[in-house]
Amino acid sequence: MRFVIQRVSQSEVRAGDETLGKIGRGFMVLIGVSDTDTKEIADRMVKKMLGLRIFEDEQGKTNLSLDSVGGELLLISQFTLYANCKKGNRPSFIEAGAPDMASEMYEYIIGKCREAVPVVERGRFGADMKVSLVNDGPFTILLDSDNL
């Protein structure tokens, strides 16, 4: 499982003319799922993400977590995080989770986050979406379950 976490001052995801999710200060998270991922892996990833202390305190040091600042979440599925570019110039996505399983894991992650964070917005699994954000810092973290 892979999470690309961007600390944002605002972010929005749209599908066509419809706004699917919109947040202020918090994390915009791109979520990639592989066929080997489980709910236990998702639990570890969510726990690690929510515990990240990457917001600045009054001394300007990154000591504060999402809950410390009343932050919000925007969670967006992104199978392309499992692009394999080793051969040729056209990426292969065979390492990405099968759509049914990946959708189930995405929904599970959203549910787990909603247990801990008051504002959790989302994209639409499998949709063509447009994401806008103001990356605060910029500050971007890649969490990979293989490295936890």
Image (cartoon, rainbow, N blue to C red):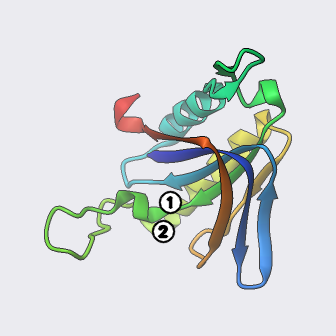
15 on left or right of 118: left
Type of amino acid at the residue the image marks with label 1: Ala
Give SS at disc 1.
helix
Q: Residue at x 69, y 21 (%)?
A: 60
Check disc 2 and report the residue beneath it. 99
Q: Give the numbered dot on residue 102.
A: 1
Residue 113 in the image, given as x and y percentages of width and height: 71, 41
Q: Position of residue 59 (x, y in %)?
A: 72, 15
Residue at the (56%, 44%) spot, across then down: 5
Badge 2: how crowded within 10 Å, few (<14), some, or many (20+)?
some
Marks 2/1 in contact by CB < 8 Å: the verdict is yes
Instruction: Name the mark on residue 11.
Output: none
Instruction: Assign the C terminus to one quadrant of the image.
Output: top left
Q: Is residue 132 above or below residue 64?
A: below
Q: How many marks?
A: 2
Pinpoint residue 11: horizontal percent, then vertical percent. 73, 57
Residue 74 percent location from the top left of the image: 71, 53
Element on which disc 2 rests: helix
